[in-house]
Image: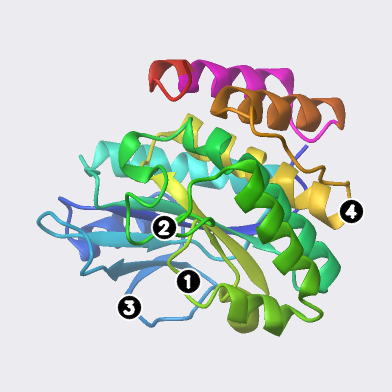
Amino acid sequence: MMTGKFGVELECFNVRQDVVAKALNDNGIPAKVASYGGSDYSVFQVKADGSIQGQNGFEVVSPILEGEEGIMIMRKVCKILADLNAQVNKSTGFHIHHNVRTWGIAEFRNLYKRFVKFETGLDAVQPASRRGSANKYCGSMYGAFTPTAEVQSTIFQKLDTCRTVRQLSEMYRTRYLKLNLQSFFRMGSVEFRNHSGTFDADKVENYIRLTFGMVQDAQDHVAVQKFTADFTAQVALDTLLQGLVRRNRITKEVAKYYKDRAVALKGVA
């Protein structure tokens, strides 16, 4: 059951911003065209995005949404974008913010260890253009390193030396990583940036549920064990999904969705 507060950014092209805003409003979803720096999170904002390759690039930025109702709203937005013939390509992304306004360093350390441990598994359910550091807007948490057990152990040690959230943010100085902490200081959120561009309602819903499960685990201080050298992408994905199902963070259906997606995208052997 999705219970938390979250926000979504969908990057697309091929439709004018005013047309997107009008379609959303016509379907009962309050929206407006906004500047790139617009911060009116009471409505959906349709913004220009210069990083998108394609005519009439834009991003749809949601207001603060919550729980199952929020997921249903996003499914409706996805259908509207599909009906408008919006398009996505390798230059577009799908980002989600989860509310962590009350978090301290312990919760953030847990989440970052969790993401580092399972990054190769999360990569396996994304196209090749979003794996590793293939995309400059969502770099690997390993940076220039190959995600071996030795490197992971070093990162865990560095994370343990961070005593404040600000110190952790200085360890990861840019927002252009798969997991972005910089948004915490502006909006009280943590941003997952690793998903490829989409307005497929099933992809959006399942990603919201998966990442929220990881956030719940971090908030509840579920221990993150170090992995060994044979921790392949397949093992990483299976371990992540099995743990989330066991703790009732996600359903078996969500887990199957991602196992099937990894196979379809050839992210696992």
Horizontal arrangement in the rendering, residue 116 relative to residue 92 (left or right): right
> What's the CA distance linking mark 2 and mark 3?
19 Å
Q: Earlier in the sequence, mark 2 or mark 1?
A: 2
> What's the CA distance linking mark 4 and mark 2?
26 Å
**Proximity of marks 4 and 1: CB atoms separated by less than 8 Å:** no
Q: Residue at x 21, y 59 (%)?
A: 52
**Proximity of marks 2 and 1: CB atoms separated by less than 8 Å:** no
What amino acid does circle 4 point to? His
Q: Earlier in the sequence, mark 4 or mark 2?
A: 2
**Tag 3, which secondary structure?**
loop
Looking at the image, is mark 2 or mark 3 nearer the viewer? 2
| Figure disc tally | 4
What amino acid does circle 2 point to? Cys
The rendered magenta stretch, by its main secondary structure, is classed as helix
Q: Residue tagged by mark 3?
A: 36
Q: Residue tagged by mark 1?
A: 175
What amino acid does circle 3 point to? Tyr
Q: Are there few (<14), some (14-19), or many (20+) residues within 10 Å of tag 1?
A: some
Using the image, tell me which numbered label, if any, was put on residue 10: none
Q: What span is colored magenta in the figure?
A: 248-262
What amino acid does circle 1 point to? Arg
Looking at the image, is mark 3 or mark 4 nearer the viewer? 4
Q: Earlier in the sequence, mark 2 or mark 3?
A: 3
Front-lying residue, 6 or 40: 6
Q: Residue tagged by mark 2?
A: 138
**Proximity of marks 1 and 3: CB atoms separated by less than 8 Å:** no
Using the image, tell me which numbered label, if any, was put on residue 221: 4
> What's the CA distance linking mark 1 and mark 3?
16 Å
> What's the CA distance linking mark 4 and mark 1?
24 Å
- Compared to residue 239, the image places residue 49 above or below, namely below
Q: Earlier in the sequence, mark 1 or mark 3?
A: 3
